Amino acid sequence: MRRAIVATAFLIASTPAHADEVRLDDDQIIAALSDQTAIYTDGEVYQYFDPNGQTPYWDRGRLTRGSWTVNGGRYCSTWPPSTGVSCYEVFSNDADEIIWIGARGDRYVATMVDGNKLP
């Protein structure tokens, strides 16, 4: 019985929140993000993923600049002045959205468009 509970818990923990979401590997993350702009669901936040590893982030009129990389099947970013790295699992779905899910379950959803479309 205990094995069944552990196995069930593992399956639940490793399953994305929505059935149509597919987890991306390193190459798929790079292909999905490079030279793309994420427009987050509220439509007021944009993030461009420069292929050189820079990532400007436009949030309701405020621009910040960070860096991004992909490591071990996760998107990772750093936002100065902090030197800390935040990493997320990345998924895509049937609606052609990209979903970032953090270690604490924080979830960010965006529609991707080609090129730098920062306001």
Image: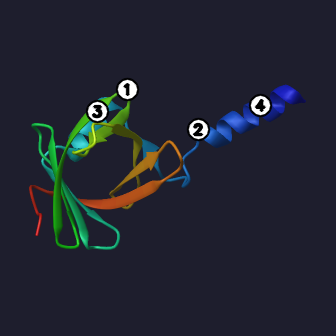
Q: Which residue is mark 3?
A: 70
- Residue 62's quadrant in the figure? bottom left
Residue 88, image x and y in percent? 40, 42
Residue found at the very far right of the displayed protein: 1
Q: Is residue 89 left or right of residue 43?
A: right
The answer to whether the residues at label 4 and label 3 have Cβ atoms under 8 Å apart is no
| Mark 4 or mark 3, earlier in chain | 4
Which amino acid lies under the numbered mark 4 shown in the image of this protein? Val
Q: Residue at x 10, y 70 (%)?
A: 119
The numbered dot on residue 6 is 4
- Label 2 neighbour load within 10 Å: few <14, some 14-19, many 20+: few
Compute the Cα span from label 2 to label 4: 12 Å
Q: Residue at x 17, y 56 (%)?
A: 64
What element does badge 4 sit on?
helix
Q: Residue at x 63, y 40 (%)?
A: 13
The numbered dot on residue 14 is 2
Camera-side residue of 35 and 105 = 105
Q: Nearer the viewer, mark 1 or mark 2?
A: 1
Q: Is residue 33 left or right of residue 52?
A: right
Which amino acid lies under the numbered mark 2 shown in the image of this protein? Ser
Q: Which residue is mark 1?
A: 72
Q: Residue at x 50, y 42 (%)?
A: 103
Compute the Cα span from label 3 to label 1: 7 Å
